[in-house]
Image (cartoon, rainbow, N blue to C red):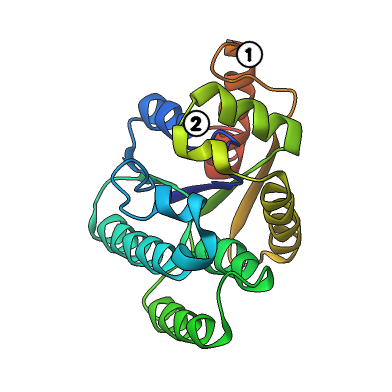
Amino acid sequence: MHIAICGNIGSGKTTLAQMLAKHYNWEAEFESVEDNPYLADFYEDMLRWSFHLQVYFLNSRFNQIKNIRASKKTTIQDRTIYEDAYIFAANLYKSKFINDRDYSSYLSLFHSMLQHVEAPDLLIYLKADIPKLVQQIQKRGRDYENAIRLDYLTNLNEHYTEWISDYSLGKILIIDVNNLDFVKNVEDFSSIVNKVDTELFGLFK
């Protein structure tokens, strides 16, 4: 199976993907962050680097999907190719950080890729409000993320709300993480596992 976790920056996707992969003995595909050659530049100058960053992420995600479909093991993916286009690229275009010509080229590439993409068997959406996102971002302390603006996070959350409300490609599990700490509290993580079990295996495994 292909399981995917989606959610805004700081919602806890990577951590939960690691924990679920360990719990279920799944493979994991993580977002290319630390070795991303554009990310730090992007947060410093979004107008200049938005298009480059989005093409990099799109290509990286497409290669992940090819690996997942070629694998014989269940894999959990940290963020989806749909978010790249419908959330991040769309938000940058709407905010005028990507111009019409580049956005048209980007969407053409995305739609070409979609012809070779199957939706995840289960999409897990981590819903988090801005205070929770800011708390999580500050806690992990990545220097380049200090430049993230609140209005940028807010706009992304609005795009997520719209996209998730219309999502119809497969099973979806929405988890409100505002009052959860699934790293420190075993009960919180267990509640998530129970919900995943129900979606994937029904009430009885």
Of residue 187 and residue 157, the one placed in the foreground of this image is 157
Give how far across and how far down residue 90 sits, in percent.
62, 70
The answer to whether any part of residue 129 appears in the image is no
Of residue 127 and residue 140, the one placed in the foreground of this image is 140
Q: Would you call the spot at circle 1 few (<14 residues within 10 Å), some (14-19), or many (20 or more)? A: few
Q: Which of marks 1 and 2 is nearer the N terminus?
A: 2
Q: Would you call the spot at circle 2 few (<14 residues within 10 Å), some (14-19), or many (20 or more)? A: some
As shown in the figure, which amino acid type bears the numbered disc 1?
Glu
In the rendering, which numbered label is found on residue 16?
A: 2
- Cα–Cα gap, marks 1 and 2: 14 Å
Look at mark 1 in the image and give the residue it sits on. Answer: 187
Front: mark 1 or 2: 2
- The residue at the point 44 percent across, 64 percent down is 49
Callout 2: SS? helix
As shown in the figure, which amino acid type bears the numbered disc 2?
Leu
Q: In this view, does 24 lie to the left or right of 121?
A: left
Based on the displayed image, in which of its 4 quarters is residue 166 positioned? bottom right
- The residue at the point 45 percent across, 32 percent down is 143
Give how far across and how far down residue 78 sits, in percent.
44, 45
159 in relation to 150, above or below: below
- The residue at the point 35 percent across, 63 percent down is 56
The answer to whether any part of residue 141 appears in the image is yes
